[in-house]
Image (spheres, rainbow, N blue to C red):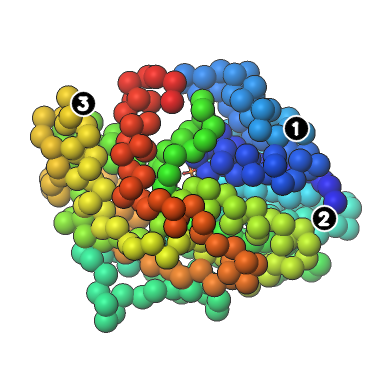
Amino acid sequence: MTGTIFLLGATGFLGSTFLVSLGKKLPQYHVVALARGSSTTSLEARTNILEKYHPNLSVVEGALEDESVIKEESAKADIVINCASSNHLALVKVILDGLNERRTKTGSSPIFIQVSGYSLLSDNARGQPPDPLTSKVYTDIGFSPNDCPEHNPLRDVDSFIIDTASKTQNGIRTLIFYPGWIYGVGEVIGLQRTTVALRVYTDLAKGFGYAGTFGAGLAGMNNIHVKDCASALLIILQAALDGRADVGTEGIYFGSSEQPIVPHVEIVNKIGDVLHERGIIPHPGSQPLKPEHASVLPDVAWSAMGGNLLGHPQRLKRFGWEPVESRKISLLESLSEELNVVVKTMAGANN
Ligand SMILES: NC(=O)c1ccc[n+]([C@@H]2O[C@H](COP(=O)([O-])OP(=O)(O)OC[C@H]3O[C@@H](n4cnc5c(N)ncnc54)[C@H](OP(=O)(O)O)[C@@H]3O)[C@@H](O)[C@H]2O)c1
């Protein structure tokens, strides 16, 4: 089997790790990667890196906001995978428009895989730990995004995808993948190699002069090693291609390991220690964000980093997926290496 995969987010942490797996397991597919130059690396240099990891890859220049590019490439693709943004409703609408155009013209049923995330599951606990009696642990069977709190920005996006899929007869096959906190170091030198939350915490620490937690930092979420996350995404894609995957309202796939939940404060303490050792901030450890700093941070950050995000994957297990790498190294064991990369990148070194 072969076809064209339009991949958004190939230069990112998850997307680049996924591309490595794609190159190994599905080299016969043509991958069209959306990419742009960054502040440190030209588009040409990034294209050269991407081309090393898949033998049949071409790059199309563009941003997520370039609607004509996104629509045109989606309309040409058999599969679109969005590893770039989980909360961009306008983007998702354009992708689905493009795929719908393809469906109408060719009579085929294209595949759309959206990478969403456990932040949809947030209980908005404002830094308080899970309550063993009342905290909800969601599972992906029988789950609807509408089960989650209304103001969560992922809810509208994911509900829109599911509604659109159910409205198009013989239509677009949609699958939504929800990872927990993705940790580990990505293997593609020159592209993004660390998880976004670590970058956010480190930037805040540099800006405010201390490592700060959301509230007391006692909230936490399930986690998954980036290689397991990429293998999960690949297995979902392969199952969709073989017609074995549930799609639409049932096309919901959680992805996390059975490793213990790590309260944010343990991660942020370590960030404070490392930044202090390197002379970037004056004190080690962490403290709750000061009111004047906490109040300017958006609700979405509070929801993701101050809430408990608890999920239990069931569908991936049916495909025989196992979190192999997460069993070898835990989030806390991986943290020093991740922070080394973050700090090097901060200093402008090639990561
Ligand atoms: N990391 C986690 O722990 C985690 C957990 C759950 C869910 N997720 C979701 O998984 C997805 C991937 O996360 P990630 O950690 O891999 O993120 P990431 O490392 O920040 O990568 C984001 C990717 O999207 C691209 N992108 C972002 N904005 C863009 C724009 N305006 N135009 C063009 N390209 C744009 C980036 O391109 P550039 O390199 O050009 O910026 C990059 O390739 C996201 O949707 C995220 O919400 C992540």
Report the disc number at residue 103: 2
Residue at image location 84% in from the left, 47% down from the top: 2
Secondary structure at numbered mark 2: helix
Task: Measure how far apart labels 1 and 3 are at the Cα level.
Answer: 40 Å
Q: Residues within 10 Å of mark 3 (few under 14, many from 20)?
A: few
Position of residue 260 relative to residue 34, above or below, is below
Give the residue number, with chain letter if any, for mark 3.
278
Residue at image location 38% in from the left, 62% down from the top: 259
Secondary structure at numbered mark 3: loop
Report the disc number at residue 55: 1
Residue 86 can be seen in this image: no
- Residue 307 located left or right of residue 189: left
> Percent position (x, y) of residue 32?
72, 36
Q: Classify the position of the C terminus by image quarter.
A: top left
Say which of 201 and 259 sits in front. 259
Say which of 171 and 80 sits in front. 80
- Residue 244 located left or right of residue 303: right
Secondary structure at numbered mark 1: loop
Viewer-nearest of discs 1 and 2? 1
Circle 2: residue type: Arg
Task: Measure how far apart labels 1 and 2 are at the Cα level.
Answer: 27 Å
**The residue carrying mark 1 has its beta carbon less than 8 Å from ligand 1:** no
Position of residue 58 relative to residue 67, above or below, is above
Circle 3: residue type: Arg
Report the disc number at residue 349: none
Residue 240 can be seen in this image: yes
Viewer-nearest of discs 3 and 2? 3
Q: Residues within 10 Å of mark 2 (few under 14, many from 20)?
A: some
Between discs 1 and 3, the one toward the N terminus: 1
Say which of 67 and 334 sits in front. 334
> Percent position (x, y) of residue 195?
41, 42
